[in-house]
């Protein structure tokens, strides 16, 4: 086993998570309280049973070219981050909150589509319709707050970013769709 002095490549396994590793196919499966998820790895990983840790090594699973060997440290960091993300997704329910700031900025559920379609009023001359994906769930708090939750981190953040892109906060009055704890630096207007 390769000794690494850098702790960012060592991942601690929580007690409520079970990890299965197929070394011949290099597939890591994480079984958590919420769901099961698999990950194809490009680098070999080593387990320490007594400390309950996973260590990502610099050894590739397949033969790689000299050009790809230069990027092995980047791949090592990416692999460690992906394993941490999969452990998080199988263990916890992830969420993102959006709030609508501005006069008349509202969100509505469309009744005929079984809560899979949202309508936004964002100060345009027309309403904007948004179809909710199957992986993400969206809950409307009042009419000016959205609560997006699910198990896939990428899907939740992508959905939140897509909704936010319909009306990004502008720097003069701070109106638009903001993340939960986002602060807008207000610019000073034109002086007369």
Image (cartoon, grey):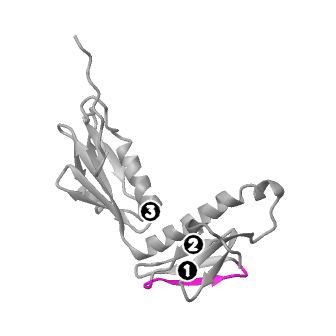
Q: Residue 63 location, x and y as percent?
A: 81, 67
> Badges 3 and 1: C-beta atoms under 8 Å apart?
no
Which residue is pictured at 25% across the width and 36% down the height? 175
116, 94: nearer the viewer: 94
Which residue is pictured at 41% across the width and 64% down the height? 134
Q: Residue 112 location, x and y as percent?
A: 26, 58
57, 68: nearer the viewer: 57
Of the numbered discs 3 and 1, the one sitting upstream in the chain is 1
Nearest-to-viewer mark from 3 and 1 = 1
Q: Is residue 174 above or below residue 76?
A: above
Label 3 SS:
helix
Quarter containing the C terminus:
top left
Which residue is pictured at 42% across the width and 55% down the height? 157
Q: In this view, does 61 lie above or below 165?
A: below
Label 1 SS:
strand
Residue wearing tag 1: 53
**Measured Cα–Cα span from mark 2 to mark 1:** 7 Å
Label 2 SS:
strand
Which residues are the magenta region?
A: 15-25
Residue wearing tag 3: 153
């Amino acid at each position: 086993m390769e000794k690494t002095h850098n702790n960012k490549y060592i991942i601690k396994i929580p007690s409520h998570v079970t990890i299965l590793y197929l070394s011949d196919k290099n597939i890591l499966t994480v079984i958590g309280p919420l769901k099961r998820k698999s990950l194809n790895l490009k680098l070999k990983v080593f387990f320490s049973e007594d400390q309950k840790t996973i260590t990502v090594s610099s050894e590739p699973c397949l033969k790689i070219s000299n050009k790809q060997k230069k990027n092995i440290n980047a791949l090592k960091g990416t692999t460690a981050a992906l394993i941490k993300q999969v452990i998080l997704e199988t263990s916890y329910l992830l969420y993102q909150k959006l709030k609508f700031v501005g006069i008349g900025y509202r969100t509505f559920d469309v009744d005929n589509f079984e809560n899979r379609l949202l309508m936004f009023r964002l100060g345009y001359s027309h309403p904007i319709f948004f179809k909710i994906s199957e992986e993400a769930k969206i809950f409307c708090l009042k009419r000016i707050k959205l609560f997006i939750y699910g198990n896939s981190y990428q899907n939740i953040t992508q959905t939140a970013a897509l909704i936010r892109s319909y009306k990004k906060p502008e720097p003069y009055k701070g109106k638009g769709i903001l993340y939960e704890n986002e602060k807008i630096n207000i610019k000073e207007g034109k002086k007369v």
